[in-house]
Amino acid sequence: MCPDLLITDVMMPGLNGLDLLQELAKDPNPDIQNLPIILLTASSSSEGKIDHKPDRFLQRPIDYLLKPFSSVELVRRIQTRLHTVRQKLELDRQV
């Protein structure tokens, strides 16, 4: 079973957030490939690092949330991402 959404931090010990996304990009499961992601970061420069990844890495829906952020903002981003996924699923079913 695939989660509906992934929230990860760029700066984590061991496997950092960008490396985690790169590993997910290798998974052939279409549910994983379309998994929306919210990437938490303390620096806007982390967003630039993603540009150096393979094109396949950029196909997934990724949202950035800069620290510090409020819980209200995080919840709003989660709701927006999940709403977008639901709309896409509905459109796919209609086709």
Image: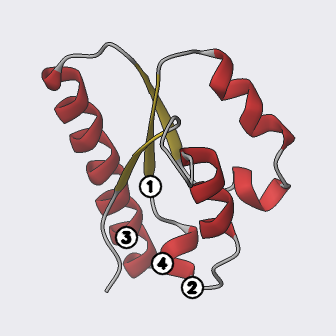
Report the mark closest to the observer, 2 or 3.
2
Of label 1 and label 3, which has the lower sequence position? Answer: 1
- Residue at horizontal 68%, vertical 56%? 59
Q: Nearer the viewer, residue 91 or 19?
A: 19
Helix, strand or loop at label 1? It is: loop
Helix, strand or loop at label 2? It is: loop
- Residue at horizontal 85%, vertical 40%? 52
As measured in the structure, the alpha-carbon distance from the residue carrying label 4 to the one carrying label 1 is 10 Å
The residue that disc 4 covers is 31
Q: Quadrant of residue 23?
A: bottom right
Relative image position of residue 38 (x, y in whole percent):
42, 42
Question: Is residue 28 found left or right of 43 in the rendered image?
Answer: right
Helix, strand or loop at label 3? It is: helix
The residue that disc 2 covers is 29
The residue that disc 1 covers is 36
- Residue at horizontal 57%, vertical 85%? 29
Question: Is residue 53 found left or right of 27 in the rendered image?
Answer: right
Amino acid type for the residue under numbered disc 3? Leu
Q: Quadrant of residue 25?
A: bottom right
Amino acid type for the residue under numbered disc 2? Asn
As measured in the structure, the alpha-carbon distance from the residue carrying label 4 to the one carrying label 3 is 12 Å
Amino acid type for the residue under numbered disc 1? Pro
